[in-house]
Amino acid sequence: MPMDAAQWAELGQQLRVDSVRASAAAGSGHPTSSMSAADLIAVLISEHLRFDVDRPDDPNNDHVVFSKGHASPLEYAMLKAVGVIDDDELLTFRKLGSRLQGHPIPNVPLVDVATGSLGQGLPIGVGIALAAQRLDRLPYRVWVLCGDSELAEGSMWEGFEHAAFAGLDNLVAILDINRLGQSTETMHGWDLRSYSSRLGDLGWHAIEIDGHDVEAIDRAYTEAEATAGRPTAIVARTLKGRGVKAVEDQPGKHGKPLDDAEEAVAELGGERSISVPVSKPETHGSPHVFEAPGGSLPSYDVGDEVATRKAYGQALAALGGMRGDVVALDGEVSNSTYSEFFREAHPDRYFEMYIAEQQMIAAAVGMQVRGWRPFASTFAAFLSRAADFVRMAAVSRANLRLSGSHAGVSIGEDGPSQMALEDLAFFRAVYSSAVLYPCDANQAASLVERMAERDGISYMRTTRGATPVIYEAGERFEIGGTRVVRESDDDEVLLIGAGITLHEALSAADALAGDGISARVLDCYSLKPIDVEGLREAAAAAGERVVVAEDHWPEGGLGDAVLGAFADADERPRVVKLGVRHMPGSGKPDELLAEAGIDADAIASAARTLVRGGVPV
Amino acid sequence: MPMDAAQWAELGQQLRVDSVRASAAAGSGHPTSSMSAADLIAVLISEHLRFDVDRPDDPNNDHVVFSKGHASPLEYAMLKAVGVIDDDELLTFRKLGSRLQGHPIPNVPLVDVATGSLGQGLPIGVGIALAAQRLDRLPYRVWVLCGDSELAEGSMWEGFEHAAFAGLDNLVAILDINRLGQSTETMHGWDLRSYSSRLGDLGWHAIEIDGHDVEAIDRAYTEAEATAGRPTAIVARTLKGRGVKAVEDQPGKHGKPLDDAEEAVAELGGERSISVPVSKPETHGSPHVFEAPGGSLPSYDVGDEVATRKAYGQALAALGGMRGDVVALDGEVSNSTYSEFFREAHPDRYFEMYIAEQQMIAAAVGMQVRGWRPFASTFAAFLSRAADFVRMAAVSRANLRLSGSHAGVSIGEDGPSQMALEDLAFFRAVYSSAVLYPCDANQAASLVERMAERDGISYMRTTRGATPVIYEAGERFEIGGTRVVRESDDDEVLLIGAGITLHEALSAADALAGDGISARVLDCYSLKPIDVEGLREAAAAAGERVVVAEDHWPEGGLGDAVLGAFADADERPRVVKLGVRHMPGSGKPDELLAEAGIDADAIASAARTLVRGGVPV
């Protein structure tokens, strides 16, 4: 039997009470930001949400994303109301070991992703809705609760724009316009029109309501459900701290428990224990399955010159034939990253995200919520645009595969704005990450397959220019491995490279041989995890003298990763780190490698000095 | 004598011809993206720009930003037309050593900042316009040429929104709507209304024109100049590759020289040598100077407990009294970062940037163009939102001071979404950066002053919780230094910390003393530049045994920085790196430090094992 308006209002009060209680028990948290949205959530869960609480993994379930993740007290109050957690657990909020963290993480039913860095939940919701529309092909809905402070984040507008462009009528954005941010009023206060007009221009169906009028909320959700061809935004005027005079619509009440929680609970009408029987999905469809006829990875002949970015694209396209769950996204540079091979082979599973890297990563996070295996690509330099999204994806325990092309000074003429020289440092410092930097096409292809198999966040750095194929086709490369590519019994120095510098190291070894110096060369294609044993053995076999060269700033990349492998070892070689130390400009790739001091000459010179007992300056 | 329409058109053709010639000489570049905007630039420089070519640093000069930085051939063709470079230099485009790089950098008059990562020029222009309005208080104008592909970047909409909010009628955005991106058509094609309506909603004066109708362009600029109280956007329908049939409005012609440049030049009417006498500024005002009555840095008593974030804010406020050129920006968390002390003391020089970190950094870059010294702050975790802006600021050789608060697991209950655990790795890998992590309030205050004095990008990581003051007030700390905070003649192990872990290291030393182990403790507050000699001396005096602990992932932070200091040294200590290895949750700060294995117990335990000849697992 459906609930009536009075019951919805009661439920709203319960959600407020429980938000206040949870925050009081924790001694911290964001009750006032929860109270503004309580009525919006009350009506949602009692009338409109379709979710089988007993089967949280049912692919037909709706999804709810709290883009305003700091309203976690409300989210947990909601979980209690729908029977996912009990009252005892509610009061463990923010305590060590509790599932109910300060900001949501996907460790309980109904929570798909971590939020708490504002501006991310909506674009992630776009990704889930895209998965529903184009991958699963199921009619489930995605409801995203957004704050108004986060509407200042450009990423929200990337999401709004893409959702309209894709016609995502399965997406409902609920905008909780309580006007008050953390330290000041938002730019637009309660000017609902300032939001709804922009959304309307983009192609959204925007509905302005009083966010505490439960019947208006119900009508708006009903209208959203009936709206075809475009997403709906419910722009709701609300009061922060609604229902408790001491905090309602008051500045300075953000992010702290109420001074007198007991009194507040009394003012809200006391504790309640309404249990909401959430409606189950009306449909019982199975997710669409893409045909995967099989096939094999591309192979390349030793000695040919092939760019690893091209091998990435060709391997990804091949993988799409081998696995139906692989999907690809690109930031409007698919003809540079070569994800265009995948787009051409599997257009139904390719997503053009335009030049909106934050939305691209967010969409990938959304798709992996539903079990798809997204590979997202752009220039490595421009992945930095989405650094916070990658960081949060790790908090979400998301499984993402990322490829950044055009890394380093070796791109040449385009200049430093297009050269990733910090990507390895960034991705090494991402929780759960693997960081891969292949030097040839066969290695790149093999590693693309490993990335698909691996959980967590995998990053592959690819090279713009063609490099010689040095490995036989079909050789299998593991994440966490190395390869000794040149060795003898009397090696005096170890040259370590990856990607473009591996080839420079090989040339350096040739030059050193001419001087009578025997150099071992190690391909350290997996910067993280790094092959500690392989590195230690190779260094030991080469006189504990190491030169490591990278097309990257000297900080945080290959050199630092190599040093880490020896930090607490019994034998700690002398290591000379070669990296890019001055801001490069435009020039030919070879000129820039030489100018940066990371080419074969520089490596050979450093090795010579090291073997002769000195330290290169 | 003013030019007439026919002359404007001729000048537009010259700019096209020179774009084609420069790209042909380089063998790469983006001539077609230049050709679409040539008429827009022709009318701008011949009629509306106010710039004294002989006095490029005149504070009354207008500013021109190519947000679509890949239209660099057009920018250099413009520089030739106005007499900043000659034709010989034009043809050095993209060659090693040339000032005319693949994408603009601020090494020639009229180019203030680097662009080439799309979506940045407009928000930087907002910063320059804010400087004009609120800092310099001069009537110069900022003209920003934007591409349409970059309008998919959320950062552009952060900029558009802030400009309207601030009423920047000195800002003109010129939108070159040529409809074609790199690999596909934009989402909105030639639907000018899709842009102008959104801009109008935000409060811009938006004018739709044919971007090849020079008289319409002139009228639009005149209208922009006459518009008070709000910024103007000129939404111009253009043809990519305009004027050359082989490429005009053709897909697949992005980012490459024309196949037959000679024929194209002929089709465009041949080479011209029109020289444009750019009008000088009509005003000769002096930039506003803020009073700086002097004062001194705050001081704290040894033994008191003060959060370094609070010392940051108080020191910044004091610095504002000592230097009139210091300004502050915050991402709507000024009561967390404590930039609120500056806001209260110097409201005229404080900029509330709301939750739009990209715009915040871009505004700071814009302000430093005019010689102001911006300090920008937010939670350290959320600075990652602007990672690409920081990267590009380094390419711009910008002088920025950044502070990130609430770093590491020691923030406690808010959980991992709010914990920066990768900021040190990121900022170490920024060109020109200094990376500082003070452990006490007096140190933080001293380093804030050092940051103001330093060029390049300086980053200070601050701590949420209060920590004991251990240094005397007035002690001067240098960037690049260390401090030995505990030592004896028979030290057996060196404990290295910074920020929160320095205090844990001190406690560990106390515990070790109880076991009869004498530990030296080093405060490595400057991660970059790092004090190589200080580290080597301290390790040598402590048995070449080192434990380094950081509230950060193990990759790229303090531990890696320390290892780098010993990489090629004669004596390379055994180093045990302690960092956060598992994703933290919510909990009390002490609980989380313990769980992460970076508290005093963990440090002491590692040190004990090391001294006893083992290696901690």
Image: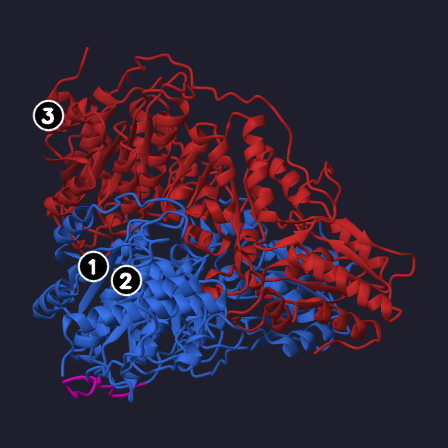
Chain colours: A blue, B red
Q: Do the residues labelled 3 and 1 touch (CB within 8 Å)?
A: no
**Residue A585 location in percent, x, y?**
47, 43
Q: How far apart are marks 2 and 3 (CA)?
A: 52 Å
Looking at the rendering, which quadrant does residue B272 occupy? Answer: top left
Badges 1 and 2, same chain: yes
Q: Mark 2 lies on which chain?
A: A
Between residues B109 and A368, which one lies in front from this camera angle? A368
Between residues B376 and A136, which one lies in front from this camera angle? B376
Q: Do the residues labelled 2 and 3 touch (CB within 8 Å)?
A: no
Q: What stretch is highlighted in magenta?
A: A280-295
Q: Which residue lies furthest to the top in this view?
A: B1
**Residue B398 location in percent, x, y?**
48, 37
The residue where tag 2 is placed is: A37
Residue B301 in the image: above or below residue B221: below
* Residue at position x 37%, y 73% in the image: A76
Three-letter code, disc 2: Ala
The residue where tag 3 is placed is: B215
The residue where tag 1 is placed is: A211
Three-letter code, disc 3: Glu
Location of the N terminus of chain B (image quadrant): top left
Looking at the rendering, which quadrant does residue A137 occupy? Answer: bottom left
Q: Which chain carries label 3?
A: B
Which type of secondary structure does the marked residue at label 1 adopt?
Answer: loop
Badges 2 and 3, same chain: no
Q: How far apart are marks 3 and 1 (CA)?
A: 49 Å
Q: Are marks 1 and 2 in contact (CB under 8 Å)?
A: yes
